[in-house]
Amino acid sequence: MFSSIISTSNLVRPDLDNFLNYSKQFYEAKQYTNNGPMVRLLEARLAEFHHAKHCISFANGFWAIVLTLKALALPGRTNVVMPSLTYRRLADIVAWLPLKPHFCEVDPQTLAVSAETVAACVNDQTAAILATHPIVNCCDVEGVEALGRRTGVPVIFDAVESVYESVAGGKIGSFGQAECFSLHASKLINGFEGGYVTTDDKDLARRLLFMRGFGFSGPDNVVEFGLNAKLCEPHACMALACLDDLENQVSRNRARYNRYREALRLAPGLRLLEFDERYRTSYKNIVVETTPDWPLSRARTLDILHAEGALARSYYSPPLHRKSMAYPHIPADLPITDRLAEKFMLLPCGHFVTEADIDALCAFFAFIDRNAAQISERLGS
């Protein structure tokens, strides 16, 4: 169906001249890394954007989360409470510290952690809460934050898919002890690669600044645990150019989302996971549920889509607690997570997906729905 593959990655491309104009500034300053002028400008703009006092950039989102957990985890404790229905390598991040992932349930309506699901796992060995926002909408921000205050356990939000989002209490980026974001090409703000942390904690911001740069404070003066996790200038320039175009991107995302919402009516067995439009949202990701009325298994549906050049993906499946892990973790029985992990698909979206592509894909879903019996017979299942 698609001569050029369409995928679930954002891959947004900003104006090239704008990117080059930013790049000229670090080139003329002759500083390409080590907290250069474009990195400082990006951090200032992102702090303002998220209504946070501080922003610290990193080479990628992975080290942003690792070092934030390292800085905030309560000493003498071993566990980090986190969802199992999340990014397939998130538990590895916890293990790097080394701490133990303690998997919790999610709310079946939001697909995200809530104060209740997290509280069930908090105990005297809980070093931190790593609350992850889902791909569509946000987790129970205010509830989890209040739980952290009551228990004295630091709360870190994994907000890599929630850059633009808001909740009743305000803009994502201003909650918990810290919030962590990604600048990967698949995310809303494309820095080629990169990440950043927002926080209102001045001391934490200062520590993270040292930690991302080998722990140095001045030449050869080591004051903190550290490694090389600095963002370099070309990545900051790309992110700045994308930030300049962000409102236009969100408008394009909204148009794609609305086209999906209309066109998916052709396939009533697929339920669109709708954005909460009471608050600001990016409309970036398109997630559908395969309901009991959908005639094929999710796995078979994905196989067919991939054969046609539409690289849809299962939504966080298998969940992390079902995977084999080569490091200590807290085993969990999570029936809600198990059930949800079998039901959802992430559909093609982002910069290279057109509204015509969406119409063609949804018409194909309708074709599958009408001809499921013949398709299954043809494919031998």
Image (spheres, grey):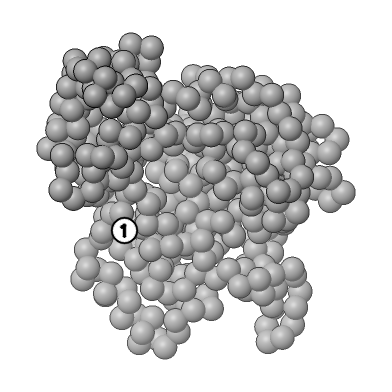
Residue 378 % position (x, y): 24, 24
* View extreme (left): residue: 356
Q: Please report the residue visible at 61 percent of the width from the left and 73 percent of the height from the top.
A: 228
Which quadrant would residue 376 be assigned to in this image?
top left
Residue topped by disc 1: 242
Seen at 26% across and 59% down, the residue is 13
Residue 222's place in the image compared with 93, above or below, is below
- The amino acid type of the residue labelled 1 equals Cys
Horizontal placement of 305 versus 363: left or right? right
Residue 202 as seen in the image, left or right of residue 287:
right
- Residue drawn at (58%, 42%) of the image: 157
Could you tell me residue 365's position as x and y percent?
Answer: 22, 25
Foreground of the two, 45 or 98: 98
Residue 215 position (above or below residue 306): below
The furthest residue to the top:
293
Residue 250 vs residue 194, the one in the foreground: 194
